[in-house]
Image (tube, rainbow, N blue to C red):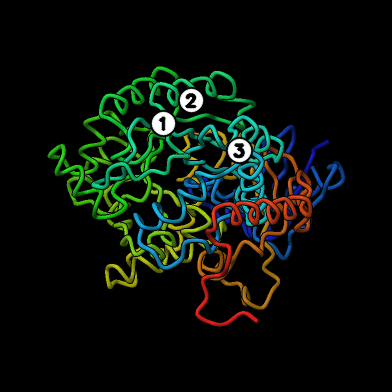
Amino acid sequence: MVDIYIRGGWIITMDSERRIIRNGAVAVEDGLIIDIGKKEQMDGDYKAYADIVINAERDIVLPGLVNTHVHLAQGLLRACADYLSLIDWLKDRVWPLQGNYKKEEALASAKIVVLEMIKSGTTAFLETGLVSRYGPDEIIEMIRGSGLRAAVARHVMDLKGYATKENILHEGLVELGDYSLKDTIRLIEKYHEWDNKIWVWFGPRTPGAVSVELYREIAEKARELNTGITMHLAEVREDVEYTLRDFGKKPVEFAHWLGLTGRNVVLVHVVWVDDDEIKLLSETKTSVSHNPSSNMKLASGAARVSDMLRQGVNVALGTDGGPSNNTYDLMREMKHAALLQPLRTLRPDAIRAEDILEMATIRGAKALMIDHLTGSIEKGKRADVIIVDYWQPHLHPLNNPVSHLVYTASGHDVKHSIIDGRLIMFNRKVLTMKEEEVLEEAEKAAWSLYERTGICKTPDLKWPVV
């Protein structure tokens, strides 16, 4: 007897050989993938003995997507900060909104983001930085209840700046260094490695908001506690100006000097770097989270992803947050990542669809240090699997499933989601959350926040609303 048997369709394994099995099948028992192969060879062993049989003849079956940069607290802020560059975007809109959150509003924001990620094919993600006012304990427990895997970073800081701009962080987000560090350690002791589903990481704020001494303490504690670190780096030119001006080092050199490179580190954006810095990322096995929609919307620049991949850097994919992307759909993000590199290099072959799908699956799992558990469909790995319906006009004719997933599909095409061998979404209905209740809570919380801050209270439209 097996728990779930998926039969038919294209199986994109993302295994070491990157096999694609046509008319394939996958058998799942006790949360593990116990067999994979051709449908006609496996049906006799599993079809009649499975608790759940999913017929996928008109589907593409692939590993769940791994989103390596998520702001759970920005789910309520979509369309609240359009048409601004990063620092003004943060100072005038995003930070005042987040700095006024009540815990129930932050939880409502996190719920709507988690729901969207499940419905668009994400099965694991990296949250970039919670703070006390958001209620991190309640958010972590909500994530676990949803069924998603997550590495949840908690922000650590002891200054109030961003790059060359001093004292611009909203007062509602300011925390003392000793407190933010100790509270992160508290969360690690309470939740880290919870059922191989939840991990707690350090999330130091961007250079300008953390002292050298605290950065070094974070690096030391992460090694001591066997956990990860994620940090924004070199997102905009001002980041380069700051590290060069104050420390005489380029951003990646600065991070390395502090101990913030290595297998347990995910640096986010990494747009403004040179060849030497890319080489350093490769040599230190530091992962990079690429967020193309955010970089384009905020006019931050285009990361040198194709160059990084060629030099052996582990580059993964992220959506960033509600006001910098407006969606948490990683499936849609794949197309933007695929199109940006040819535009940047003026070479149509700068990056391939296969590279992009790796970034969204196995490379993302590697960045989160869970590639031994997930990121591919292989015997012995946990069953994190999504099923995409290709029997639709925009996905026909299907002669190349990888190209279709990257250039054509969106999260709305994800039909079923299985995480840790558990059916989390079936026929687009999420089974672990009350969808209507989540939507109503988010709507109510957002308007309470808008009224209190005066931001986003009226739409930023050039056209009249009558």
Quick check: marks 2 and 1 in contact, CB under 8 Å? yes
Is residue 359 visible in the rendered structure shown here?
A: no
Cα separation between marks 3 and 2: 19 Å
Residue 223's x, y, as percent? 38, 21
> Element at badge 3?
strand
Q: Amino acid at mark 3?
A: Arg
Quick check: marks 3 and 1 in contact, CB under 8 Å? no
Q: N-terminal of the two: label 2 or label 1? A: 1
Q: N-terminal of the two: label 3 or label 1? A: 3
> Element at badge 2?
helix
Residue, x 61% and y 53% (percent of image)?
Answer: 62
Tell me if residue 207 comes above or below residue 387 in the rendering: above
**Disc number placed over residue 249 in the picture, else none:** none
Q: Nearer the viewer, residue 73 or 173?
A: 173
- Dividing the picture into quadrants, the one containing residue 250 is top left
Q: Nearer the viewer, residue 323 or 95?
A: 95
- In the shown orientation, is residue 144 left or right of residue 280? right
Q: N-terminal of the two: label 3 or label 2? A: 3
Q: Amino acid at mark 1?
A: Val
Q: Badge 1 is on which residue?
A: 156
Cα separation between marks 3 and 1: 22 Å
Residue, x 54% and y 58% (percent of image)?
Answer: 454
Q: Residues within 10 Å of mark 1 (few under 14, many from 20)?
A: many
Q: Amino acid at mark 2?
A: Thr
Q: Badge 3 is on which residue?
A: 149
Cα separation between marks 2 and 1: 8 Å
Q: Badge 2 is on which residue?
A: 184
Q: Quadrant of the N terminus?
A: top right
